[in-house]
DNA sequence: CGCGTCCTTGAACCTTTTCAATTCAGGTGG
DNA sequence: CCACCTGAATTGAAAAGGTTCAAGGACGCG
C-alpha cells in the first residue's frame, strides 16, 4: 500500500487523489479517529474502503437502500430527511465535514432516511462489517464509535425539545447558533456563512414553513441581530441570538 | 459470589429475588440478549451487576449524573425528559419492559436526560465498561447492542417527523398506535390500556398542551374511535386511528 | 370524607400557516 | 454582454389550529 504510493510520483495522480489518509486529514480532531493512537489510525485508514464524490443534488443513500456502510462527510454539505407515512418528508439534519451519516441503517439493515448533497461533496466510505471487526479489536475506537452514536442521540433529543416547545424565533436562533458553532469548530468564520440550504429546507428542519423562516430572518435583521441577503448571512449580535433561545415563552 | 448465593437457602431469600437470569427472563426475545446463543446469554447475565427497584415518582438518573451504566426496564414504566436552556423540560420518551435507558450518557460521560419511574418499576443495571468488554468479545452481542442504539436513532427521527409536521390529531393517533404496538409486542392487550402518564406528560411528549390532548381524546371518543375514561383507554377502531395518521394535512 | 391532583370544557387570543402577489438572484442562450 | 427565464425569497392579508386563561368536575389517596 505504501509501495503503491511511491511507485510513481505524479503530483496529482488519481490514486493520490483517492488515497485515504486519516493521519494527515484535516478532520482527524473531529472525526472517527479522534483520540486514537497512531497505530490504530493506520488500521482505520486501511479499512476506509473508498472516498466517493457526490455531486450537488445527488443522493448518497435513500430510504430502503441496503445498509452496507456508514459515511463520513469529508468535504461539502448534506441534508438527511425522513419521510412520514403520508409522503411528506422532513429534514432531520444538516451535516458537514467530519460528521457521520447512515447510522440509522444498522437497526434493520436498510437505511431509514435519505441523504442528499447540498453542494459538491466527498465522503469517506466505512464498510460497516469492517468497522465492527475493528471496534472489537481496538477499545478506543470502539469507545469513540459509541460516543459518536450517543452524540447523535443527544442531538436528536435537543431537536425534539426545539420542535416540541420552542417558538419560531427561538427555533431559528437555536438553529443559527448551532450552525455557527459547528462551522467555527471547523475553522470557518463564526459570524458569516453562505447558507447551503433553501428557506424551505430550513423550515422543514425546524418544523416551520419557509415563509415563517423568511419573516423571522427579516425581523432579526430589522432588530440588528443579523444581516441577511439571500443565502449570505452574517451574525451581528451573537449575544442577542443566545438570549432569544434562552428566553422563556 | 456464587458461594454467597448458596450460603443459605430460604425459598425467597433477598439474593434469589435479585438473582439475574436473562436465560429465563420473559423479555429475552425483546431485550439485549435477543438472538444470542445460550453461552453468551450466560456471560451477559453474569455481567448485569444488579437489579434495582425504582419506586413510582423516583428518579433513576438525572441530567448531569455521572454515566456508569445503562439500564434495561424489567418491569414498570418510565419517562425520560430533556430540559431546554430556559428550564422547561420535555418528555423525550416513554419506556417499557425490555427497553434501554441511558444511552445518551455515553457521549460525554454524563447523562443528558433524566429518567423517572411512572409506576413502581425494576431495572437491570448493565455497567457500561463491562458491556464494552463483552461486546468486544462477542460479535453477536456487539451487533445487537448497535442495533438497539440505531433503533433509538430511528425512533428519534420518527419523533422529529411527528413534532415537525403533524397536526394535533395525527400526533395523538401516532402516539396511541405506537403505544399499543409496543404493548402488544409484550403480550398485553392491543386495545385497552391503563395510561401510566398524565395528559400533561403526553402533551409534553407530543409538543402539545394538556388541554389539546384532552380535547383530542374527547373528539376521538365522540367519533367512536376511542373510549376514554381518565387513565383507562380503549381503542375501538384501530383502522380509523391509522387513517388519521396517514391523512395528509 | 376531604383535599389535592388531574381532567374536561369553554371562550378569547395569538402564533403560525395558507394563499397570493411581487421581487430578487443566478444561470442560459441568443 | 444583455435579456430572459426559472426557482427562490420576501411580504401582505386572511384563516386556522392550538394555546392560554378560567372555571367546574371527577377521581384517588390519606
Image (cartoon, coloured by chain):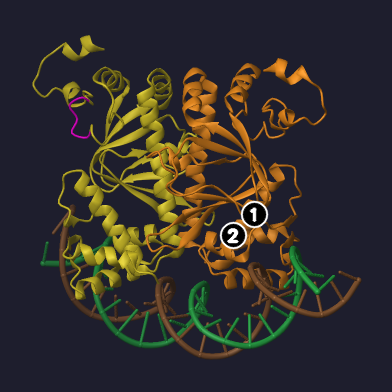
Chain colours: A orange, B yellow, C green, D brown
Q: CA distance from mark 2 to mark 1?
A: 9 Å
Question: Which x, y percent locates residue B21?
Answer: 21, 24
Considering the image in quadrants, where does the C terminus of chain B appear?
bottom left
Residue closer to the observer: B145 or A237: B145
- Report x, y in % for residue B164: 46, 62
Whether the magenta-drawn stretch holds residue B24 is answered as yes
Q: Which residues are magenta?
A: B23-27
Q: Percent from the top left, x then y, of residue A42?
A: 63, 20
- Residue holding disc 2: A245
Q: Are marks 2 and 1 on the same chain?
A: yes
Find residue B16 and report its image quarter.
top left
Q: Is residue B102 visible?
A: no
Crowding around mark 1 (Cα neighbors within 10 Å: few <14, some 14 to 19, many 20+) is some
Residue placed under numbered mark 1 in the picture: A177
Instruction: Answer with left or right where residue A102 lies relative to residue B209.
Output: right
Residue at figure coordinates x 68%, y 69% from the top left = A220
Residue depth check, mark 2 versus mark 1: number of the one nearer the observer: 1
Residue A38 lies, in percent from the top left, at 66, 19
Tag 1 subunit: A
Residue beneath the point at 55% across and 67% down: A168
Instruction: From the viewer's side, name the closer residue of D17 and A80.
Output: A80
Pointer 2 with pointer 1, Cβ within 8 A? yes
Amino acid at each position: 500500500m505504501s509501495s503503491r504510493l511511491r511507485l510513481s510520483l505524479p503530483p496529482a495522480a488519481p490514486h493520490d487523489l483517492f488515497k485515504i489518509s486519516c493521519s494527515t486529514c484535516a478532520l482527524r480532531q473531529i472525526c472517527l479517529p479522534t483520540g486514537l493512537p497512531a497505530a490504530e489510525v493506520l488500521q482505520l485508514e486501511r479499512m476506509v474502503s473508498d472516498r466517493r464524490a457526490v455531486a450537488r443534488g445527488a443522493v448518497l443513500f435513500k430510504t430502503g437502500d441496503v445498509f452496507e456502510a456508514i459515511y463520513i462527510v469529508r468535504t461539502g454539505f448534506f441534508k438527511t430527511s425522513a419521510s412520514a407515512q403520508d409522503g411528506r418528508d422532513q429534514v432531520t439534519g444538516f451535516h458537514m465535514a467530519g460528521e457521520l451519516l447512515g447510522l440509522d441503517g444498522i437497526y434493520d439493515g436498510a437505511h431509514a432516511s435519505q441523504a442528499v448533497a447540498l453542494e459538491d461533496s466527498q465522503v469517506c466510505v466505512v464498510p460497516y462489517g469492517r468497522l465492527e471487526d475493528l471496534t472489537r479489536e481496538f477499545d478506543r475506537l470502539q469507545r469513540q464509535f459509541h460516543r459518536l452514536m450517543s452524540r447523535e442521540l443527544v442531538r436528536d433529543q435537543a431537536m425534539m425539545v426545539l420542535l416540541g416547545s420552542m417558538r419560531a424565533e427561538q427555533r431559528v436562533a437555536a438553529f443559527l447558533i448551532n450552525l455557527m458553532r459547528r462551522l467555527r469548530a471547523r475553522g470557518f468564520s463564526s459570524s458569516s456563512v453562505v447558507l447551503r440550504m433553501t428557506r424551505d429546507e430550513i423550515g422543514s428542519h425546524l418544523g416551520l414553513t419557509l415563509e415563517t423562516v423568511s419573516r423571522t430572518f427579516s425581523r432579526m435583521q430589522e432588530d440588528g441581530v443579523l444581516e441577511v441577503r439571500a443565502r449570505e448571512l452574517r451574525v451581528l449580535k451573537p449575544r442577542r441570538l443566545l438570549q432569544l433561545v434562552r428566553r422563556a415563552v
